[in-house]
Image (tube, rainbow, N blue to C red):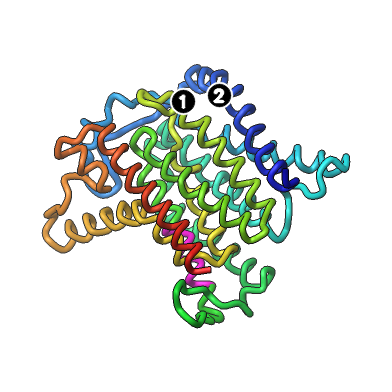
């Protein structure tokens, strides 16, 4: 078997074993520390009474899952460094060209949203979380740093943005930086918006990372592919415990970081436009929130949806949580399959 494939799947399986073995103890630790989900009727802009009625049974469910997958991911990186030092493998998962930016993303988003999640759970300062402006400021700052790294360190100043099925590519020059910032902020928040139903965001992310495992491997980015597989197996372990009734939830930090990391991979592999296909559900969820907010502000608080984002609207009109999740899974899986076909055809 190809040595790259052996390394890729070895790290994936090891990630799953570590995660699955630690998870039961970790859940009991979170329960003992009372680090559980809080759902309040006061939303950021309006009363969330309908939302509270739909999900009040989830109050108290542990939410700090992000810490476990963060530790697991960085443990895989540490193990790979040790194996490289002992000449067992040729390259560790810590690589400037392929994984630096992804790992930096996971860490920086963790620093900010770990504080935010903890405040949300404990209701520190009698507030739901850090202010939206404060978090947006830091997310923009991180996005600016990431865009500059891409532009100057990864030589995007001399690259073209690939538009599938067109005979020529687009050279966007310095406009790459604002485009990158917009993409990262929008993609990170789109996953976070979808992370309120058992299994939903986890499966949609799994489909996306599975496709990017193929893309990165096809482009010879084997270390990045190994990191994707490690995240996939950690997601599989998470989904095992996230079956309804969920033992714990993804929560803000990891949904944001996983979303941002995937779109950084899209920029690394120059498949930005292709990823829009597999991200269609996340995009629509985000648009439903924007449409709802715009309608309430411009039409004297008249709503388009009963609740936004859209998956909560489906619950509010009578769909069960399981029906919403399974049908959105099917759509997400179809988009992922179509995405692979689309990528192969445009090569």
Quick check: 233 left or right of 321?
Answer: right
Q: Residue at x 36, y 32 (%)?
A: 198
Element class at badge 2: helix
Q: Is residue 208 magenta?
A: no
- Res. 177 mark: none
Which SS does the magenta portion mostly show?
A: helix
Element class at badge 1: helix
Q: Earlier in the sequence, mark 1 or mark 2?
A: 2
Q: Is residue 182 magenta?
A: yes
Residue 8 position, x and y percent, is 67, 43
Q: Nearer the viewer, residue 104 or 206?
A: 206
Residue 204 position, x and y percent, is 41, 44
| Residue at numbered disc 2 | 23
Mark 1: few, some, or many residues within 10 Å (few <14, many ≥20)? Answer: some
Mark 2: few, some, or many residues within 10 Å (few <14, many ≥20)? Answer: some
Identify the image quadrant of residue 174: bottom right
Q: Residue at x 69, y 38 (%)?
A: 76
- Res. 241 mark: 1
Q: Is residue 81 above or below residue 243?
A: below
Q: Is residue 96 above or below residue 129?
A: below
Which residues make up the magenta segment?
A: 177-186
Q: Nearer the viewer, residue 6 or 142?
A: 6
Residue 232 position, x and y percent, is 55, 40
Q: Residue at x 64, y 28 (%)?
A: 18
Q: Are marks 1 and 2 in contact (CB under 8 Å)?
A: yes
Residue 73 position, x and y percent, is 63, 39
Q: Nearer the viewer, residue 290 or 235?
A: 235
Identify the image quadrant of residue 20: top right
Mark 1 and mark 2: Cα distance apart in space: 8 Å
């Amino acid at each position: 078997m190809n040595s790259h494939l052996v390394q890729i799947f070895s790290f994936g399986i090891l990630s799953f074993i570590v995660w699955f073995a630690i998870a039961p103890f970790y859940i009991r630790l979170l329960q003992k520390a009372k680090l559980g989900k809080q759902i309040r009727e006061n939303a950021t802009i309006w009363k969330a009474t309908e939302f509270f009625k739909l999900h009040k049974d989830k109050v108290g469910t542990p939410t700090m899952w992000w810490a476990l997958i963060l530790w697991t991911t960085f443990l895989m990186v540490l193990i790979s460094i040790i194996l490289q030092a002992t000449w067992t493998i040729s390259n560790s998962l810590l690589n400037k060209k392929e994984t630096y930016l992804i790992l930096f993303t996971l860490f920086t988003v963790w620093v900010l949203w770990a504080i935010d999640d903890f405040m949300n759970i404990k209701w520190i300062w009698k507030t739901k979380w850090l202010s939206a402006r404060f978090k947006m400021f830091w997310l923009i700052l991180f996005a600016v740093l990431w865009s500059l790294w891409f532009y100057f360190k990864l030589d995007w100043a001399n690259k073209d943005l690939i538009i599938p099925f067109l005979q020529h590519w687009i050279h966007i020059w310095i406009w790459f930086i604002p485009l990158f910032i917009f993409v990262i902020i929008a993609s990170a928040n789109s996953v976070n918006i979808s992370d309120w139903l058992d299994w939903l965001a986890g499966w949609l992310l799994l489909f996306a990372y599975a496709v990017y495992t193929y893309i990165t491997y096809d482009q010879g980015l084997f270390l990045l592919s190994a990191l994707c597989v490690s995240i996939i197996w950690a997601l599989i372990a998470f989904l095992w415990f996230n079956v309804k009734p969920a033992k714990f939830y993804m929560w803000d930090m990891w949904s944001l970081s996983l979303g941002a990391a995937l779109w950084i991979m899209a920029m690394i592999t120059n498949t930005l436009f292709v990823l829009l296909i597999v991200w269609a559900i996340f995009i629509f969820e985000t648009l439903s929130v924007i449409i709802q907010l715009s309608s309430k502000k411009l039409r004297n608080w008249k709503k388009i949806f009963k609740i936004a984002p859209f998956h909560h609207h489906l619950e509010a009109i009578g769909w069960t949580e399981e029906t919403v999740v399974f049908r959105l899974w099917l759509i997400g899986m179809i988009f992922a399959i179509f995405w692979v076909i689309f990528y192969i055809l445009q090569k």
